[in-house]
Image (cartoon, grey):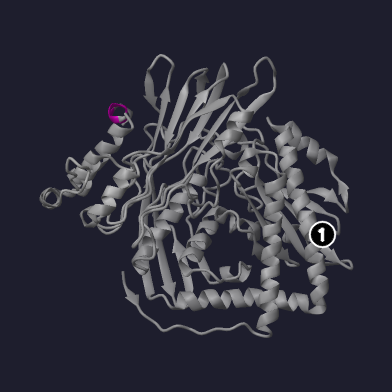
Amino acid sequence: MSLTARSEIVTQPHGDPVTLEILKNALESLADEMALIILRSAYSPIVRDSMDYSTAICDHKGRIIAQGLTNPIHLGSFPRIMQTLTERFGSAIAEGDGFLVNDPYDAGGMHLPDIFFIRPVHLDGVLVGFTSALVHHTDIGGMAPGSMALNAEELFQEGLRIPIVRLYEAGRENRAVFDLLKANSRMPEEVMGDLRAQISACDTVGRSLKSLAAKHGAAFPALVEELHDYSERLVRQRIATMPDGVVNGEDFIDGLGADGEPIRFSVAITISGSEIGFDWSGTSDQVAGAINCPITTTWSLAYAALRTVLGPGIPNCEGYMRPVKMTAPLGSIVNPRPYAACAARGVIAYRMLDTCFSAFGKLMPGLVPAGGEGGPTAVTFSGYHAGTHARWLVTDGILGSWGGRAAHDGVEGISNPGANLSNQPIELMEARLPLRIREYGYAANSGGAGRTRGGAAMIRSYVIESEDAAMTLRSDRRRYLPLPIEDGMPGSPSLTILEHPDGSRALLATMKMGEQPLKRGDVVVHIAAGGAGYGDPLQRPAETVLRDIEDGHIDNAFARDVYGVVLNSCGLVDVDATELQRRKLAEMDRPQRIALQQGHFLEAMNATELLKVGN
C-alpha cells in the first residue's frame, strides 16, 4: 500500500446557500414522506415489518435528487432505471403516465422481486421531475415461494420479468398489466396491496413536488443543477483529504450448498486526487445459482461504502456519484452475463460491503468496525392453510450483529449498515401464520472476543404448526467467519439446525439448494453469525468481562478460557488468578485461542457434534 497525504480542499455552495439548503431538506423530506406512506399502507410483512423498500425523487432528466432513509443497497438502482426510462421514452413521457419495471439486466433493476413504480410530475404541462418507489414484493412466481430459489440457474426460472412498461397511460390504468402481475404471484393480494401503496406514495408526494417546483418557479431547474454540483464538490473535497494510493480488501462467502466452492471477493480501491475507483478484478466468476450480483447492485455497494466512510452532510443527489469509477469484469459474480440467476444476490451485496470496509480500514484506522454478521439471513416459510387452497408465505430477515469498534463494543439487534431493515415482530408472525416462535434473542458465548467485543449473534427458532410446509434459506458466515481487527477474534459461525419431534437433529447448509420440506412439530433454529472482535481480548478490562457474564452474554468458562478472567467463589474477579491465566493464554498460539472460543460457542448451542458432521 502506497499512500501520499494531501491537504484539504475547501468548497462552498454557489449562489444562495440558504435557499439551496432549504430546497435540499424539502426534497429529502418528500422522499422520507414517501417511505412513511409505504410503511403505513403496505400489506406484506417484508415491506411493512422488514421495511425492504426504497423511495426516490428525481429531476426532469431522471437524475436522483433525494432518496428516503431506507435501504442503502438500492443506492445505485434508481439512476440506472431512470437512465433507461428517459433514453427509451424521452419526450413521449406524458402527464399521468406511470411506469413499472424490475428487469435487472436490460433495464438496470436489482432482482425480480424488486419492482419499481415511477410517476412523472408535470407543472403546467412541463416535466419537472419524477417520484419513484422500489418495493421487494412477496412473490412474483418462479421455482420457489418467495421468488428467491437458490438453485435457479437462469433469470427465467426466478419469476416474472418486467421490462419498462406503462402501468398508467395519460392517467388511464393498464388493466392487463395488473392482471398479469396477479396471475403470476402466489400471493396476489399482498402484491396488489403493496403495489397500490407504491402508487399512493408516488402520487401523494408527486403533488408536493409539483408545489415545490411552482414555489421556486423558473429558478427550480437551476437550483437542482446546483444541488448536483454541490454534492459532487463535497464528495471530491472529502476524497481529496484521503492519501493517494491503492488499498486492497479480500473476503469470502461459503459457497452454494453443503459442498460449494468458496467464492472470493477482491477489491482494489484507488484514490487519485479527488476521484475514487473500485476494481473487482480477481473476484470469482459467476455461478450456476441465484447469488450472482448484477452490476446495478455492485454500483450501489460502492456508493454505500463510500458514503459511510465519508460521513454525513452530503446531499443524496446524483452529483455525488460523478467522482466514482468502477471496474467489474463481465462474467464475474459481481457483474454476471445476462441472464444469470440473481434472486438471492443480497448475500453477495453484503460481502462486497464487508470487502470494501476491510480496504477502507487500512486508509482510516479506527474508523471502520470489525466484521459483522455479513448481512441478514433470508428464510422463507410457505404452505397452505388447513383445509383450503389458500397459501401462506413469509420471508423473514434475521439481523443483525456488528463487529467491535475502536472504542465501543459491537451493537446488537441493529441492521447491517448496508440494509437498514428491521426484524419482524414475532407477535405479528404468530398471529397470522401457522408458526410459533420458540426463542428470539441473543446466543450465549457468541460474537468475537476482543478489547471491544463483537455483537452477540441473533437466534430465532420457528415451530411449524401446519401439517406440511417448506422452507428456503439464504445465510452465510459458517466457514468464513466475520473478520476481526488488531488481534481480535473472529465472529461466531452461523448455524441453522432442523429439529424433528422425535429428537433427531440436522445441520442445514448455509445456502440450502432447493426447498426443505417440513412437518408439524419441526423446529428450525437459526443462529446468525456474531460480530468479530476489535483488539486483543486479554486487554479487555476484567470488570467489563464480569458485566458480560452478569448480562448473560458469556459464561464463566468462556470468560476464563477466552478473556483470561477468573472469578472467585463470591462471583468477583480474582485478580491474581486472572493475571496468571492471562499470561498463560498469551503464550498460546492464535489458532488454539480461536478454537477455544468457538468450542465454547458450539457447546452453548449444543452443536459441537452437528458442526463436525456438517463440515
Rendering coords of residue 460 (x, y %) = 46, 34
- Number of labelled discs? 1
Query: Compared with residue 214, is residue 169 higher up or lower down, i.e. above or below?
Result: above
Q: Residue at x 86, y 51 (%)?
A: 169
Given the image, on which type of amino acid does mark 1 rest?
Ile
**Crowd around label 1: few <14 · some 14–19 · many ≥20 (10 Å):** some
Query: Compared with residue 191, is residue 401 higher up or lower down, i.e. above or below?
Result: below
Rendering coords of residue 29 (x, y %) = 68, 64
- Side of 295 relative to 485 (left or right): right
Q: Residue at x 41, y 75 (%)?
A: 242
Residue numbers of the magenta segment:
608-612
Q: Residue at x 51, y 18 (%)?
A: 519
Q: Quadrant of the C terminus?
A: top left
Residue on which disc 1 sits: 93
- Tell me the quarter of the picture where residue 605 sits: top left
Q: Residue furthest front?
A: 570
Q: Quadrant of the N terminus?
A: bottom left
- Tell me the quarter of the picture where residue 356 sits: bottom left
